[in-house]
């Protein structure tokens, strides 16, 4: 654990809805929902709508009951992408250590940015001001020494705020942290944890790593590592590199995990055929999951050896689908991507065997 790292998590506020209100003045100050009517679910809700209890992933008929004057608008992905690119350009003014985890959030590591001149809090405030002035949107920021803490902190003073978790106060903070605030803990896992008497970070610490592993498997180990700061993952930039992938959007959302695995196997078979034709192998495999509420999640794993066959990729994807836990929400798209490529896979494997 490196308590001297300076990590900022930037999270745009109600991003899709805010872009719609920015670009359409008649929607400002009104409760709006992006999407909704086409698939019967709210993809994103403005803060005005959230005051009535409207949330993303909520059925549209339920949202209308809570807020009868709710305005549904079609999403404009190109506008979201353009705004996202502008935000990332601002972040690059401070460091190249940028890990963009979705269209509206990113981690940056500013440990080496003017360490004796400005504080991380000052940098976060300046970034938020630039986003407001140049993109005409608001962002919240979390500042700490791990990605986990920075992400949790960015949610503490939303919208249009920031929060700092100082290393000296981190242990006290996580002890009082509700388990549902830990990234990756959804309603299903929350209920399981609560049933076992685990409501806060301090309950995880009392249970201990061994008992957490025995009762909750890999998810238990993941949770324990987070609250003890032993899961000290670095900010990893997504460099421009070649990649090969396949994905599929489903007519009906998928909830059954076995069905997800069947769909992924079919996707991987098609990807393996393409890799064979191009004589390509890769070391980094990525699972893409788009949920029914249009939220996109990616999970990646870098292997020691190059892979390209169906069994090799399926084994890796099977592990990624389960980590830290199976998707808890209905899924509308699944994709598999292979990157960190070696163009001549046979040559690459021979070199590995030689050494």
Image (cartoon, grey):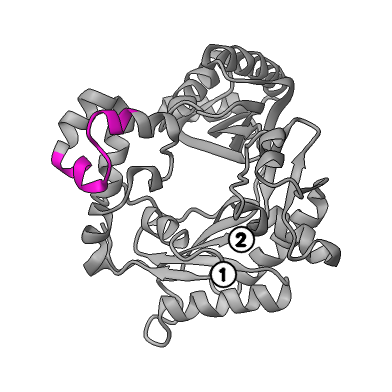
Residue 80, position as x, y percentages in the image: 75, 55
Q: Is residue 274 above or below residue 151?
A: above
Residue closest to the eye, 227 or 190 = 190
Please name the predominant secondary structure of the magenta segment in the image.
helix
Residue 330, position as x, y percentages in the image: 60, 26
Seen at 43% across and 24% down, the residue is 353
The residue where tag 2 is placed is 13
Res 338 visible: yes
Q: Quick check: 264 left or right of 303?
A: right
Q: Quick check: 159 left or right of 273?
A: left
**C-beta proximity under 8 Å, tags 2 and 1:** yes
The residue where tag 1 is placed is 160
Residue closest to the eye, 161 or 247 = 161
| Residue 173 location, quadrant | bottom left
Q: Classify mark 2: residues with Cα within 10 Å, few (<14), some (14-19) or many (20+).
A: many
Where are the magenta residues, as a range?
192-206
Element under disc 1: loop
Seen at 42% across and 76% down, the residue is 120
Residue 249, position as x, y percentages in the image: 73, 26
Does residue 204 belong to the magenta stretch? yes
Residue 270, position as x, y percentages in the image: 70, 17
| Residue 276 location, quadrant | top right
Q: Classify mark 1: residues with Cα within 10 Å, few (<14), some (14-19) or many (20+).
A: some
Q: Is residue 82 above or below residue 324?
A: below
Res 355 visible: no
């Amino acid at each position: 654990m490196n308590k001297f790292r300076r990590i900022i998590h930037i999270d745009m506020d109600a991003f899709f809805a805010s872009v719609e209100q920015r670009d359409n003045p008649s929607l400002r100050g009104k409760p709006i929902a992006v999407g909704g009517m086409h698939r019967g679910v709210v993809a994103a809700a403005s803060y005005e709508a959230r005051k009535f209890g409207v949330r993303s992933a909520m059925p549209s008929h339920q949202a209308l009951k809570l807020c009868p004057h709710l305005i549904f608008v079609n999403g404009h992905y190109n506008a979201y992408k353009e705004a996202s690119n502008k935000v990332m350009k601002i972040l690059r003014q401070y460091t190249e250590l940028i890990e963009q985890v979705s269209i509206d959030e990113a981690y940056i590591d500013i440990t080496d940015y003017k360490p004796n001149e400005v504080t991380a809090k000052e940098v976060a405030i300046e970034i938020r001001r630039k986003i407001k002035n140049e993109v005409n949107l608001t962002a919240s920021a979390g500042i700490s020494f791990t990605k986990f803490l920075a992400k949790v902190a960015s949610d503490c003073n939303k919208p249009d705020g920031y929060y700092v978790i100082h290393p000296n106060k981190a242990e006290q903070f996580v002890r009082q942290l509700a388990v549902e605030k830990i990234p990756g803990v959804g309603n299903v896992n929350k209920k399981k944890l609560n049933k076992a008497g685990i409501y806060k970070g301090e309950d995880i610490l009392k249970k201990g790593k061994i008992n957490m592993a025995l009762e909750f498997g890999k998810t238990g180990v993941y949770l324990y590592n987070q609250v003890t700061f032993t899961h000290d993952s670095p900010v990893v930039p997504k460099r421009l590199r070649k990649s090969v992938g396949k994905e599929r959007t489903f007519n009906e959302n998928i909830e059954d995990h076995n069905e997800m695995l069947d769909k992924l196997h079919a996707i991987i078979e098609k990807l393996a055929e393409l890799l064979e034709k191009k004589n390509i192998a890769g070391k980094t495999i990525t699972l893409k999951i788009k949920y029914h509420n249009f939220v996109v999640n990616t999970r990646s794993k870098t292997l020691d050896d190059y892979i390209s066959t169906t069994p090799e990729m399926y084994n890796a994807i099977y592990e990624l689908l389960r980590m830290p836990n199976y998707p808890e929400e209905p899924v509308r798209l699944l994709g598999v991507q292979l990157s960190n490529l070696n163009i001549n896979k046979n040559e690459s494997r021979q070199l590995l065997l030689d050494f």
